[in-house]
Structure formats: structure tokens, C-alpha cells
Amino acid sequence: PSWIQSPSEISVSLGQMVALECAVANVSADKVNVNWIRQSPGQKPEGVLLFKTDLSIYRALGIPEQYVSSRDASNKKFLLTIRDVQEGDDSIYFLTCLLDEHAEVGGGGSNLPQPRIQLFPPAQEELATGFATLTCLVSSFFPGYIDVLWMRDSQAQAQAQGVRIGLVALGEDKTYSVSSYLTLPDSEWGLDASYSCVVKHESLASALEKNISAKDYKRQ
């Protein structure tokens, strides 16, 4: 399919609502999966929303509920609406389209690039400061909508418990990567608990998991 995004630039005041519009041609709109992407000044491109033909929406990590995607099938248009615009919403927005029948080849997304996980222990220099940060690097996945969770001895760790996540970045190979971090007091890391980075993505039939423990790290 081909598409036209209009207008090319929109000025809006803080707190207002804005709607970005894209029209597709040469194909029925209800056969197209739309991947909205943005690139903020000084940042790499990152996924925003994936709007699928069945009207389901996949929201990228860190994208708030004020971003809403919709479809006007009769006019072959897709809309990205941003409510209560804030300074951080100032970006270049663009999209990619994927025909539904193309997405179904291989049975439910098995042909999509699957994520890889690398899990890194705390640096020795950080341990001397009284803290320990575990890093989970997830790479080589597409599209850019993914869930990254931390588990401690099979118990989920909430964001308020020292979990933070970076931007989802689009690489030169057209796949995405993201890093998630779990920061603990050094005393907790020393308890030899088992920590897991768990990834859920539409290319995976089940969650992907990688484990690490202070006990194993001390053996190295």
C-alpha cells in the first residue's frame, strides 16, 4: 500500500488535543496493520502504537494512555490522537503499514524477528556505593511493542521497587532494542536471590526468560 500523511506540520498548545492523519491508497484500510513511530529531537525512533486489523492496539513501553489510535475504514484513513499534549510529545511522527495477509504467513507471527535477551550483573564499582543494578538488554525484535518484567524468586518486581526502562530504539537493521534496569540495595543482592528478566512479544509463543543470581556471579 501507499499512504499520505497530512498536514506535514501541526502547531498545538499545551493541554490541547491533536489528531495526526494518514490515508492509505491501493488497498482496503481494514486489511492494513499500522505501526505508528515517533522520533523526538536528539533521540532515536521509537514505537508508539501498533493498530491491527482486528482493532486491537499494542502500546509501546512508556507510551501513556493519552495516545489513541483509530481507523476510518470508509475513507481509508488512520488517526493518531494525542490528548492533553505535553512538551515531551513534540516529535516527528510517521508510520509503516503491513498487509494482514502478509502478517499471517507462518501462523500468528512466527516469521517476525524474535527478541534476544542479555542479562548483566552489577558492576563492582557500583557495589562499593551500596547499590546493585541488574541490566536486561532486549534486542532484535519487531515490531517495537514488548513487555519486559523483572522477577525475584518468582515474584514480580513493580516499577516502584527500583525498576526503570529506557526508550525503545530502532536500529539500522530495522529491528528494535530496549534496556530495563533493576536497582537494589547491595545488601539484597548479597542474599543470593534468583532474578529473572521476562520478555513477552507477539513473535513468541510463550514468554522468554533469562536468570541470574548473586551466587552464580560470585562463582565467576
Image (spheres, rainbow, N blue to C red):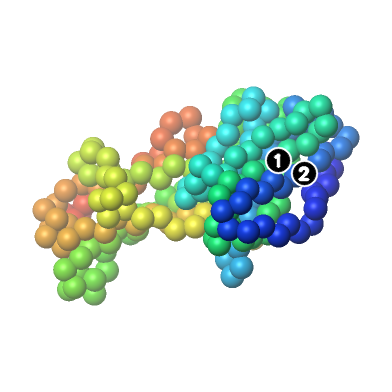
Quadrant of res 149: top left
Which secondary structure, mark 2?
strand
Q: Nearer the viewer, residue 26 or 195?
A: 26
Looking at the rendering, in which quadrant would you find the C terminus?
bottom left
Mark sitting earlier along the chain (1/2): 2
Q: Which residue is mark 1?
A: 79
Residue most extreme to the right: 26
The percent coordinates of residue 195 (x first, y second) are 25, 48
Q: Amino acid at mark 2?
A: Cys
Q: Nearer the viewer, residue 18 or 79?
A: 18
Q: Which residue is mark 2?
A: 22
Quadrant of res 184: bottom left
Is 3 displayed left or right of 82 in the figure? right
Q: Amino acid at mark 1?
A: Leu
Can see residue 17? Answer: yes
How far apart in space, not on screen, are marks 1 and 2 (Cα)?
6 Å
Looking at the rendering, in which quadrant would you find the N terminus?
top right
**Total numbered labels placed on residues in the image:** 2
Residue under the image location 67 percent in, 57 percent down: 12
Q: Are marks 1 and 2 in contact (CB under 8 Å)?
A: yes
Can see residue 219? Answer: no
Q: Nearer the viewer, residue 147 or 116?
A: 147
